[in-house]
Amino acid sequence: MASNSTFSVIGSDVTIKGDITASADLHVDGTIEGDIACASLVQGETSSITGGITAETARLAGKVSGSIRARELVILRSARIEGDVHYEALTIEQGAHVDGRFAHGARNRASDAPAKPASGDEPKLGLVS
């Protein structure tokens, strides 16, 4: 990826088997079998990701089988997620399907005991219809 690129697109006709690391934003419409680490992830409705996702912000609309760690996470109504979700701020549209555990704090490991939020630092959960 060139240093002047602001985002990368993985088209619906592309299948990748392997981990992806991007320093910029990533838009995925295709199929990925591997972990993804990027600044910002946008997943299309027809996309399928099998592996872990680590991003500052993520907007998920397709199928994900794996854990998700994001500071700001939006799960759209078309999303189908199987895996644990770690977040700082979370929005879930009505109709989205998540089969896994939610944990506030994107940096917490799944094996850690849940952290108690400090006063004024309660988890943010929004439902959008």
Image (cartoon, rainbow, N blue to C red):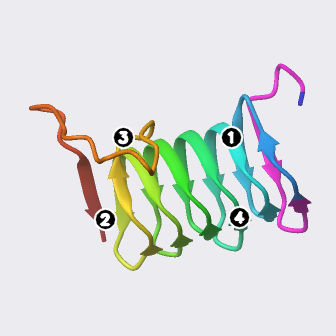
Check disc 4 and give the amino acid type. Ile
- Main secondary structure found in the magenta portion: loop
Pinpoint residue 13: horizontal percent, then vertical percent.
90, 68
Measured from the top left, where is residue 84 in percent x and y? 47, 61
Q: Secondary structure at mark 4?
A: strand
Please tell me whether residue 54 belongs to the stretch shown in magenta: no
**Residue flagged by tag 2: what amino acid is it?**
Val
Quickly name the residue at label 1: 37
Q: Nearer the viewer, residue 11 or 120?
A: 120
State the separation of the CA atoms marked 3 and 2.
21 Å
Q: Is residue 71 left or right of residue 103?
A: right
Q: Is residue 60 above or below residue 57?
A: below
Instruction: Check whether the beta carbons of the residues at disc 3 and disc 2 lie within 8 A of each other.
Output: no
* Of pointers 3 and 2, the one earlier in the residue sequence: 3
Crowding at mark 4 (Cα within 10 Å: few <14, some 14-19, many 20+)? many
The answer to which of 6 and 114 lies nearer the viewer is 114
Mark 3 residue type: Gly
Residue occupied by mark 3:
105
Residue 49 disc label:
4
The span from disc 4 to disc 1 (Cα, nearest Å) is 12 Å
Crowding near the residue tagged with mark 1, few <14, some 14–19, many ≥20 C-alpha atoms within 10 Å: many
Q: Earlier in the sequence, mark 2 or mark 4?
A: 4
Q: Which residues make up the magenta segment? A: 2-16
Q: Which label belongs to residue 128?
A: 2
Q: Nearer the viewer, residue 13 or 90?
A: 90
